[in-house]
Amino acid sequence: MRLLEIQRFWLIALLIWLGGIALGYAWLFRYSFAAGKAMTAPLAIPASLAPAEPLTRAHLFIALHPRCPCSRATVRELAKILSHSAGATEVTVLMYKPAGASDTWLEGALLDECRRMKCRIRPDPDGRLAASVGSLTSGGVALYGGDGKLRYQGGITASRGHEGDNVGENAVIEILRGNGGSHRSMPVFGCPIQKDAKQ
Amino acid sequence: MTTMITRLVPAAVTLPTSVAAESTKRLTADELYSAYEDTVYRRTDRFFFVLMAVQWLVGILFAVVVSPRAWNGATSSVHPHIYAAIGLGGLFSFFPMLLIWRLPGKAVTRQAVAVGQVCFSSLLIHLTGGRIETHFHVFGSLAFLACYRDWKVLPTATIIVAVDHLVRGMWYPESVYGIAFTTPWRSLEHAGWVIFEDVVLVWSCFVSRREMRNICEQQFQNQELLDGLENRVHERTRDLEAEVAERRRAEEELKTLTARMVETSRQAGMAEVATGVLHNVGNVLNSVNLSATLIRERLQQSRLSHLTKSIALLRENEPNLPAFLATDPRGRQLPQFLGRLSEHLVEENKSLADEAESLDKNVQHIRQIVAMQQSFSRVFGVTESQQPERLMEDAVQFNLTAFDRHGIKLVRQYAPTPLVLVDRHKVLQILINLLRNAKQALRDSESVEKQITLRIAATDDGRIRFAVTDNGVGIRPENLTKIFGHGFTTKKDGHGFGLHSGALAAKEMEGSLSVQSDGPGAGSTFTLELPAAARELAA
């Protein structure tokens, strides 16, 4: 009888445990799928970001928080885009830093990776430049065509920190290849660049 | 993988403590198999306890290194992945570890371990963004689970992996495959590889269990053989113990018999000594009797009455004594008569004095014999330092009369020796017996000059040697080896105790008794060797 009670106890504990696992996964997935906030990007490249020379090809602006762990996946997806689009676009990385902080705040793995990809790096005090292209979350991309018009806005990962083929990435590649692209906007997954951009 | 399993699983059955405690009761092959199973389950449980703890800690460490903080502008907080590593990793690990602690070896524990382990795989795959390399954790986990040798844990793990892949592959493929677009076929492909491994692992589980059963059956047979052997050893041990006990009992009986025989022979020796004493006393008493008779006859025949008659005649003629002596014929013969009477009385007195002296001597002799007997018959067992010559002479005294009677000449060759530490009476018993035997050998001999030579000397090895040599009838060579045997005798009236008990007594005193003879008519020598007193040796 006592053995039965013990078994019943452990059976209940087992069920509770399995329930806990399910809840834990639910919480984790919820976090992973929590998209960051974004604003609508301007239809043309804002003046603050307009290149000095005339546009000859597409221009991709990507906002990154240099210390966001989730954005490593974004940078790797960017590398894939560049490798698939064969120099079809200029890339400007708007690297967030707090206003008044020195440029050393930017240093880290993300910056190194961007340098290796020969991206143009622009420090972005308080994320103001990113906000000018509608990005309030690290990993937000704004792609303008060679004509200066907005073609895509959003993330290039499917969820927080997850590499791999996804809708946003494929849309950008298709646009750069001149195939139009099925999507114009996707959620961004990453750390908020500005405090008011909480998920 | 097979190598890993082999390394983790020992070839021999190690019984759990509870089973080992009952090892006095022989286990059947099934019981041994159950014990073996339990050992494997518990050992693998312990392995997973460590593995899960390490996985958990490594997961936390990984999260801390890779995703330490989540940023919100310029501010940061602990990254949710760290919470996930601590919380979810702990959730996956804690319950199986708790079960391992509380219910080791149970099926529910193994199943929970399987669930927890593949959940951990699932978490790692998710956190690494579906990196294909992380999928190896699934295959490694299945191999580890196979260490239980319980195929039933593999379907549990496989079902969870399959469901996880299918569900996430449909709803969240990035978290499991790292890509956003996939088909159910990819999940089936992953499941196929897992099933492929499962087939191998399930087969290895069955093979391993069959080997376990073979080992247990072999061990059971060995136990049976061992039992048989042990029973035989026990039986043989019991037989040997009974044999030893029997021998001990026989030895005790032999000791008792020997003691009785020694006592009997001692008493017999004492009786012989007493007989000798009485014989000697009797001989002396004959002389005493003779002397007494002679004295009585002399006194009866004494002429003292003639003196009384002469004195009465003189008193009767006292008034006219001169005339009587001068004229009376009786008076004239009286002085001459008195002179002759006086001479006769002096002679008689001398004769009586001689007889009285002889009588006194004989009485003294009897006293000496009695004193010797009293001395001899004191209690045995007292060990004391003795003068060897004194011992030999005391023994001689018991036989002296017989030696005189048979005209045996004694020759003494005594060298200076230290004392001997012995039981005096045992030595006397031996020596008296040797002297009596020598006397009898001489009595039966036709030798003209009968002689006994007594020798005493110290040997080089610190012993004292008493030798009694006679030139009597001698001993046949074939009897030399039997002469000390119990009951052996060559004498008509002998009983075979004397030399046997003498040899035993010599051995008791750490000495020896031996004989040497050149054959019939060549006489014999009996040698008694005894240890010298230690003090004397030291001196």
Image (cartoon, rainbow, N blue to C red):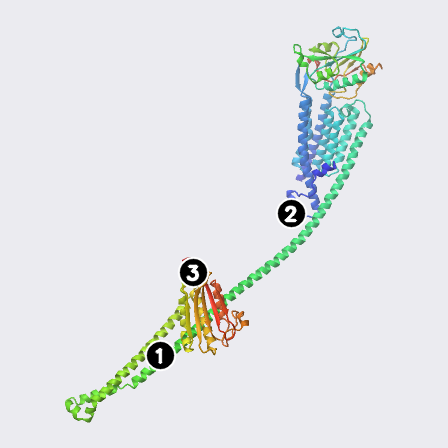
Task: Check the image and name the residue furthest to the right.
Answer: A179
The residue that disc 3 covers is B533
Q: Nearer the viewer, mark 1 or mark 3?
A: 3
**Separation of residues labelled 1 and 3 (CA atoms):** 43 Å
Q: Is residue A78 depicted above or below B217 in this figure?
A: above
First in sequence: mark 1 vs mark 3:
1
**Separation of residues labelled 1 and 2 (CA atoms):** 93 Å
Amino acid type at circle 3 is Ala
First in sequence: mark 2 vs mark 3:
2
Residue B23's disc is: 2
Which residue is more in the foreground, B80 or B179? Answer: B179
- Residue A4 in view here: no
Q: Is residue A20 depicted above or below A65 in this figure?
A: below
The residue that disc 1 covers is B288
- Kindly indicate whether the residues beneath marks 1 and 2 are on one polypeptide chain: yes
Amino acid type at circle 1 is Val
Q: Is residue B301 depicted above or below A105 in this figure?
A: below
Which residue is more in the foreground, A3 or B146? Answer: B146
Residue at 36 percent of width and 73 percent of height: B367
Residues packed near mark 3 inside 10 Å, few (<14), some (14 to 19) or many (20 plus): some
Which residue is more in the foreground, A69 or B271? Answer: B271
Where residue B157 appears, x then y in whole percent?
Answer: 75, 33
First in sequence: mark 1 vs mark 2:
2
Helix, strand or loop status at disc 3: loop
Asked if the residue under mark 2 is in contact with the one under mark 1, i.e. CB atoms within 8 Å, the reply is no
**Separation of residues labelled 2 and 3 (CA atoms):** 62 Å
Where residue B400 appears, x then y in whole percent?
Answer: 40, 74
